[in-house]
Image: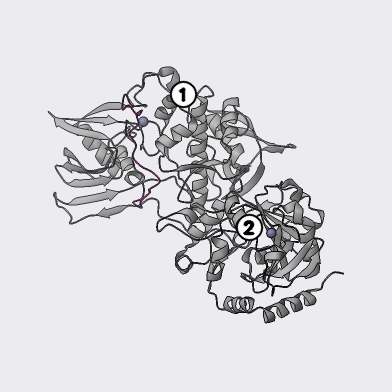
Amino acid sequence: MPFTPSSIRHFFESQIETWPLAKENYAALTQVQIREIHLNGFDCPICIQHNPARIRSTAAKVDAASLSERPCFLCATNRPEVQVSLPIADGFEMLVNPYPILHEHYTIVSTQHQPQTLKGCWDAMNSVIDQLGDDYMVFYNGPHCGASAPDHLHIQAGRWTEVPLIKYILTNREKFAKGSSWQENSCAPLGYAICVENRNNSNFYSQFGDNDDVNVVLVHDLVIFIPRRKHRPDCFFATNDQRRLISPGTLDMCGMIIAPDKEDFDNLGAEEALSILRECGKWQQPTIHVGIVKGKQIDSTQHKDYFTLRNVTIGVNFHWQQLEDQHFKGKLRIVPEGNEKWAINDILLEDYLTSVVSSEMNAHAPLEFLKAHAIVSRSWLIAQLERKRMPPQITTKIEENTSGENSTSDNTTIIRYYDRDDHTLFDVCADDHCQRYQGMSRITEAASTAVRDTRGKVLMFGGKVVDARFSKCCGGKSELYETCWDDNPHPEFSSVADCPEDASVDFCDTHDDALLSTILNSYDVSTHDFYSWKVNYSAEEISRLVKEKSGIDVGTVTALTPLRRGASGRICLLRIEGTRRTITVGKELEIRRLLSPTHLYSSWFYPSYAEGFFTLEGRGWGHGVGMCQIGAAVMASRGYNCAQILAHYYPNARLECIYD
Ligand SMILES: [Zn+2]
Ligand SMILES: [Zn+2]
Ligand SMILES: [Zn+2]
């Protein structure tokens, strides 16, 4: 005969009365501190509970040896005599959890000592939630996903009103469990994937085998699956002040983080909390919004699995500019801007990446290079999406300090750095301003393989996806982020010598035309001077350039003095002295812009002056931060694999697969 919510409640209250330990711990729970945290970019809040009594569970050793040594605290023979049970489901009995997180917290244990599996308790979970009714949730921790007794089959139950994610799902019920497949019902209200199904017709539980890495919640008519990537976050195992005693189970993954340690409770920030949960959960493959074309009229046709845009201009401003029809996967949205319309393509990141790697890279480039590039591009893209989640930052900073007018000795300082202007209606555009994207039109087998083989893999540092920059040729030493963009420390990058261990010739010091033509767009084989180069200007030429590009007339340039260099040697602060005035300019790209009709190859140069001429002797092509494309291609051609290439250019980052 099934129990009713009130008979279960009565069982709970009588147990509390007879068991001093439980009584004390439930009384203590009413005193615990709870802090609510709002995550940037997510509607659902989370909270952190300071719960010292949970230290036994949080720090529990769950390796096979430790488990076999300790008496199982869920077996009837080892339970305290005072602990009573309720035969709530076939082969399961209900206990009051003496170390609660929820104000009414039950453990429902198998009458047999047998390993934790979802299949083994699925029927019991359904039976228990039917008896408990609408105020309760029943939940399951996979054996490696928060279960402190993975050797003894058990589930838990309690009131859901205190649990942020469950509250959020039930108050936005219409948004969830709308489709019929796992993919259709997946979403990421807290930045990691969950799947919400109708529990009465769910077959999804059967896909989890005996080593099911998942947290599961049953509530109302729903089942919520939270697939897991890790049992515990790296910070759990740290030995320094980075250590956080947080070991997420179902409740943590539902936005209720348990911190037994007061210091963690006080100091855990929103982004750190999110990182911990995302490290333990699986990410969802992002959808990228790509602005394809803008026009008065968008000529499109929807087919079964794709859509076609007619008369798309390709090769804008190139001699081969032409119109063609292009085909796209994903969805088409038409969004008005002024009196024109944008065709925006919402496409899964992996499909987008396959297309851009096909367009940007030659199919004959070494496969391991293409794979490394796919991972770098994926990391960069996800980092850009993450940046959009945060409050807007100033990415172009201009400091102009002018001291005194009409003086020849005044010194104007111009510090500018450029980051890609964010588009407002979409994430990236389809032309070279962002990355060239031509839909399904030019997919190469090589690019498909490179993307498929690295699916979901990104560079991670400190719980975040690395904003993985790359440039054409580092010139022998890679540069630090701060030299080129904002001043905030970016410890995910370091300056690397771009050479093999024997310190012989630098990887990017190559004249291999065949290889170079496979990795550089419209490579001109006569351009050999990217590794080391020399530029000569007459004093008049350089004076005119500076005036044109900076808008400041310094008179005739008399001296160029590097004031500060980055780790590679790239100048980030340069003094330009003229007969009228002196200016100081930075950073890297601004210097390159000022001293060339287009852009100097790099700001790593050594200026000299003789007989009316300035000579700039330089190294490298591009900002030099992160991967050196030419060096990476050379490494791949010499047999280094993609993991080795990435470890070389991003030695501080770790390669992780964040989604399936
Ligand atoms: Zn047991
Ligand atoms: Zn763009
Ligand atoms: Zn290099």
Report the residue marked by disc 2.
147
Q: Position of residue 145 (x, y in %)?
A: 62, 54
Residue at 28 percent across and 26 percent down: it is 533
Name the main secondary structure of what is drawn in magenta: loop
Quadrant of res 568: top left
Mark sitting on residue 535: none
- Callout 2–callout 1 Cβ contact below 8 Å: no
Compare marks 2 and 1 and give the one earlier in the sequence.
2
Q: Quadrant of the N terminus?
A: bottom right
Furthest residue in direction right, as rendered: 1
Position above or below: 463 against 76: above
Specify whether residue 346 is painted magenta: no
Quadrant of res 352: top right
In the image, what residue type sits under mark 1? Gly
Label 2 environment density (alpha carbons within 10 Å; few <14, some 14–19, many ≥20) = many
> Does 113 sit left or right of 415 as displayed?
right
Q: Position of residue 630 (x, y in %)?
A: 41, 28
Classify mark 1 as within 8 Å of ligand 3 or not, answering yes or no. Answer: no
Which span of residues is magenta-colored?
485-506
Furthest residue in direction bottom, as rendered: 17
